[in-house]
Amino acid sequence: MTCRVREWSGWAATVGVVLAEMRIQGLGVIEDALLELHAGFTVVTGETGAGKTMVVSGLHLLSGGRAEVSKVRTGMLKAFVEGRFELGGAEGATRIVTDAGAEVDEDGSVIALRAVSVDGRSRAHLGGRSVPVGVLADLSEQLIAVHGQNDQLRLLRPAEQRAVIDRFAGEAVTEPLEQYRAVRDEWLAVVAELTERSTRSREMAQQADLLRHGLAEIDAVAPEPGEDTELTEQIKRLAAVDELRGAATAAHAAVAGSPDGDPDVPGALGLIGEATRHLTGSEDAVLRELGPRLDEASVLLSEVGTELGSYLETLDADPALLEKVLARQADLKRLTRKYAADVDGVLAWAEDARRRMSTMDTSEEALAELAKRRDELAVTLAEHALTLSEARVEAAAELAEAITAELSGLAMGQAEIEITVERRTVDESDAHAVKVGGRLVHAGPDGVDDVELLLRAHNGAPPLPVHKAASGGELSRVMLAIEVVLAHADTVQTLVFDEVDAGVGGRAAVEIGRRLARLARSHQVLVVTHLPQVAAFADQHLVVDKGTSGGVTRSGVRVLEQSERVVELARMLAGMESTETGRAHAEELLAVAEADKSAPDKPKARRGGKRKKAKQP
């Protein structure tokens, strides 16, 4: 199956990439569990300590996360997490699989496996092939986004809040950010070079003199590539010229015959010629057929004889030539003793020395040229920083409006979110200072902006940093609203929420369930929760059961039927699964959730009919 379609009152949502199944073995209290996940909204519940969080831990492992030996079940040598992803033709995920040498199955699915042993070793497999753990991490970036209470804490940091805006804005921010970073890298390189030349001028001048002396010495000799090897061969030949001449002369005589034409010493060519004459005059056809083969041998010997003659002519016993070659070899050896092991290495040293000298010019003209380039890049960098800030301001206004709209449906109707985008003003002592809009600001790797998320809890209340203005339950709702808004900007299709509803109850809990159910119309949603109001909205309900046998605690995961869901929701409500009151409340929750999921969506009205403005930098 490549995709699944779900219908609600004539409205359809298609999910292309889903995590169809996940199997966990030997992880924490879970001995062996198979999770068959719905394409829409799957909820995981269970008693405290039953092992619900092991489901999320398994997903972290399957996503290439850090392996923790402590989570391997006691008494087992390894923990395994296996997942089957239905890719639905997703190009990015499919490319990662094929680049790793794995294959996508005919049905469009691929199996990922992660194994962690008690000795700390970790193994990863994809599509039946062993792969680096990083491949699973790359694949998970295309497929899964996990949101938990740790994400809430991270979102309170300014850097993370800036990343939220960038993620929400998409290409509107990523493109100017890439241009900004490219210019910043070049600007930093010029600043660093100018600083080095200015502060180390005396040391660099000394180094330049040494390099200049070495280059002059090499240029005076002017070695050629591979010349030392050629000279060695030439010296060997000149030193043994008499022996070489004797061997070549004897070989030439054996092939071509006596130089004075003595008929008693015909040589190989003469003997072959004699043999050819005998065979050519024969009346036997077999013998005559051997003649052409002798002709071929004669041609080959003739060529050898010619080459031997040419070789003899090149042999020179001139002692002056040998002395000259030896002197040249001595010059090259002086260079190889000082600069490299051979002539090719000497030439490489010279090339590197010329490159280094080009960066050691500490004259006033060179420093002025670098300073000019630095200032030009600073102006260009400021222009890109301003474009980036403007894109963030616009995105911040839209994001604040979207989060506020979500909060109104989470029992925080009077709450209002503001997002400020301000530039970090610094003084001239900051090494990374540039002038933007007439002010010196810090040019960091992510721009010049500081971003802060502010919450106005009710009308008349001042806007405060969200962690100061919100209670624990309100903070969870703010973070969930952010996650829901950002989920629509996510390219991944599988979203995992790990108890992001902590500290929430009552009507707000119902609204959280409603939001997650609506989110599941466009994404596959997996939620670990302790709230029955949230669990009631799920398309599929999984429960983690814990039991003890023989003194050993084991947990398993099973899918609940509709009647079983009533029992589990009653337990979650107040531990009243065996009472009529508890069951009645659970059935009412399920009925409310089913009616809500069957109702058509209502268009969202803008708050106040106008877009809120982010604080201008």
Image (tube, rainbow, N blue to C red):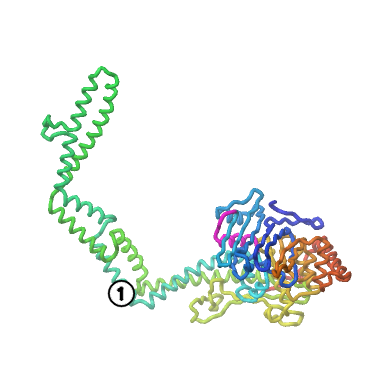
Apparent side of residue 101 relative to residue 461 in the rendered image (left or right): left
Q: Position of residue 488 (x, y in %)?
A: 69, 63
Magenta part of the protein: which range?
A: 128-144
Q: Position of residue 610 (x, y in %)?
A: 74, 71
Q: Main secondary structure of the magenta part?
A: helix
Amino acid at pointer 1: Gln
Q: Is residue 613 visible?
A: yes
Residue at left offset 23%, top offset 35%: 303
Q: Is residue 455 magenta?
A: no
With respect to residue 40, does 445 lie above or below? below
Q: Position of residue 292 (x, y in %)?
A: 28, 26
Q: How many numbered discs?
A: 1
Residue at left offset 12%, top offset 30%: 264
Residue designated by label 1: 206
The answer to which of 161 and 386 lies nearer the viewer is 161
Apparent side of residue 586 relative to residue 267 in the rendered image (left or right): right
Q: Is residue 142 magenta?
A: yes
With respect to residue 21, does 575 lie above or below? below
With respect to residue 564, does 289 lie above or below? above
Instruction: Pick the quarter of the image with the C terminus.
Output: bottom right
Q: Residues within 10 Å of mark 1 (few under 14, many from 20)?
A: few
Figure quadrant of residue 271: top left
Secondary structure under tag 1 reads helix
The answer to which of 221 and 315 lies nearer the viewer is 315
